[in-house]
Image: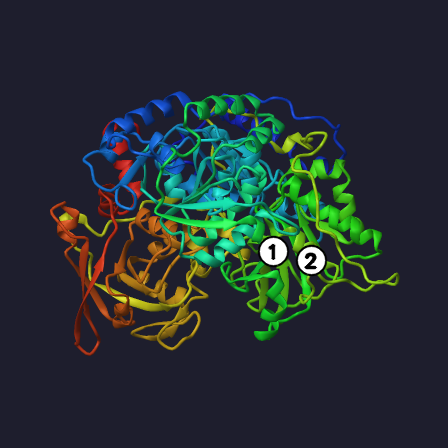
Amino acid sequence: MSTGSNIADPNSSPPSSTQQRDKMAILSRARASSSLPRRLARTFATPAALPVKDCTSITPPYSRLLKTLDEVRDVLPKGSKLTLAEKILYAHLRNPEESLGGGGKVRGERYLKLRPDRVAMQDASAQMALLQFMTCRLPSCAVPASIHCDHLIQAQTGAESDLSRSIEANREVFDFLESAALKYGIEFWRPGSGIIHQIVLENYAAPGLLMLGTDSHTPNAGGLGMLAIGVGGADAVDALTDTPWELKAPLVTGIKLTGELKGWATPKDLILHLAGKLTVRGGTGRILEYFGPGVSAQSCTGLATIANMGAEVGATTSTFPYSDNMRQYLHATGRGPVAEAADQAAKNGFLQADEGAEYDEVIEINLSELEPHLNGPFTPDLATPLSGFSSFLNENKYPTTLSSALIGSCTNSSYEDMSRVASIAEQAKAAGLKSKVPFLVTPGSELIRATIERDGLQGTLEDVGATVLANACGPCIGQWKRDEKKGEDNAILTSFNRNFKARNDGNLKTMNFLASPEIVTAMAFSGDLNFNPATDSIPTPNGPFKFTPPSGDRLPPTGYTPGDLSYAPQPSPKPVPETEIAISPSSTRLEILEPFGTNFAGGKGELPEMTCLMRVRGKCTTDHISAAGAWLKYKGHLSNISENTLMTAVNDEGGQINVARDASGEETIPRTMQKYQARNEPWMLVVDDNYGEGSAREHAALQPRFYGCGMIVARSFARIHETNLKKQGILPLWFVNKDDYSKISALDKVTTSGLTSILDGTSTTPIVTLKVEKPNGEKVEIEARHTLSTDQIEWLRAGSALNWIGEQARKTGKA
């Protein structure tokens, strides 16, 4: 998709003066309701349990799902035993016979055409998702959807000032999102409402649901026994336009939990331990399904923590059988009707695996033997038990002085998390201790913030030196204006989920070790990473002080209190089609999109000759491909954000960062791409293993496509990123022999052979031959394989998935 002039929504006719006045009045009221003075007037709410909500739009369509599952059993071989993951996926099939018929293996082989129930979008990724949805020219969304303003709020001094400053700095983006929400009937959660994943868990998640979210940690909602899958914006558009959403049937890894957590061990330690076993690639193409006696003992929010970090091992998503703790959480958050419907669905066998169901792999973890873990630095799968952490630091000559401690984020900001860290803070306070380092706390939502304030937990944390930040992502995603330790080696502890270089504070030398909020909090009072809170003491004027293991409440004893309800949207809003989308023609933040062209115009069957731009070495995450932090402000402006493309990638030919070359010499990588684009010269990339791991950031696919990339050949791809490339019309290929990676170099000319028969459906093999001609005339042929489904072939031929959706809509008269 290329960019065009910054004009109003192409689907809108010029509004009448009355319509325009009405629209402006609506937006004016919305802005007034979110005006800053009232936002900053935080008060204690009246202690009370949440009232029962209207759950009509958030209760899964269990009758339809069970009916579809009956059809599935008629298609599958008689007596087939299904895992929970398969039940939820297959119950959302549009046509069981089409996806499952004909016999043969399904997992890892078949593409499933699915009907998701809901879409959730955070403010950074929602911009591009909505800009793409607008090109489809539809009047409303086909499924319930929500927008959450959480990524654009920068942490600096504290909740009130940070929120005030960020609202003003990002007003045009928030206005755009709010106007789009109004026009298309999308629920809009205002800045300050909380982090998308916590709000989804509190309001929308439900057992057996299938939800797409434009963020890689969408699987957090799996804590309520559903399938929540992180996708790019173009995938979200599938669901929003009632286009079949396609997913290769994942393998299913069973995680059997036995025993019970003891002492300082938490659900976070379970997933940190598992990340060490599976690595960042071990879950790719798999759903992690937990079962066994150890599952039912975990809180719903604890399960959400586990599911959240399944993204760090590349898993499609994670899920758990319906439990009493899930039921209690639904009732506590005002969703009793959902719990009652789920109870009945469970009686009908829907919300748990069939007895005797087989997994592709089983990993057994005895929770009784689990100890706290700390993972890092620079990768979330480098797992070290707490008992060996001091030795690990000293052996690697890593810093042992803690520079900052941060807890909260979407991974660990539940009431249970906060009550347990407050119990540690109470002990420290009684011993006369205060945090020795900056101690930052991020509540996950206004619901959590208001409840911990009412119950005194926030005050307890502040008494020992904590700074409570806004209800937003903040430092976890790089929205942290940190003035200390710039350019210096230093170590921080966080209860976050991801710790790639420079992710949190922009400093490549900051080492982030991931841990439970309990361990992070306890270590903040020592300031020494050699300290083991389970065994060691801290000197005080009154003698050595030793922590006892933390304790807390899974749910607030007097119920949740909602706090400031003005942050929340009107449930199930009706579209207001006359609303004009708020995009200024002079904006540097937002830019209307135009469709990308196709490389197959006029019946061409092969890609045009491409020049190899560079060979990317080693770990290359979506953070490397499209940096976040300060660049988040350009998420809605493809031309501007593309200036950061691959700017921290390592060139394998020379080992330099952000260096590429064309025939005229060396330049930065984005500048070299711009030169190819200016010459209208197609180019391709060669990349290493697990290319595109990390977030669901579709800009990592959009940006190379914008600059003219036609193909990326990898040793292997991360799941979400490979799909995002396909969605934008870039051909992703896998080396058949990984050693061939080094056979293609910068300035080589590359053509494809065999793609024609794949496009016309006559091919019987996934192999595409790459014909490489080097500048000295030497020629090499390399085999690569594609993973395109039938529909994905159509996306490639059309130039992008959105082009194809538009073609289908025009054929059926929907556009």
Q: On residue 348, which mark appears? A: none
The residue under the point 50% across, 47% down is 587
On the rendered structure, is 326 left or right of 459?
Answer: left
Where does the C terminus fall, quadrant-wise? top left
Q: Which residue is mark 1?
A: 372
Q: Position of residue 724 (x, y in %)?
A: 36, 49
User: Does 756 appear above or below 807?
Assistant: below
On the rendered structure, is 347 left or right of 269?
Answer: left
Viewer-proximal residue among 296 and 399: 296
Q: Secondary structure at mark 2?
A: loop
Residue farthest to the left, as pictured: 762
Q: On residue 534, which mark appears? A: 2
On the rendered structure, is 5 left or right of 753?
Answer: right
Viewer-proximal residue among 516 and 357: 357
The residue under the point 25% across, 36% down is 807
- Label 1 packing within 10 angstroms: few (<14), some (14-19), many (20+): many
Q: Secondary structure at mark 1?
A: loop
Callout 2 amino acid: Ala
Q: CA distance from mark 1 to mark 2?
A: 9 Å
Q: Counting residues from the N terminus, which is met first, the one under dot 1 or under dot 2?
A: 1
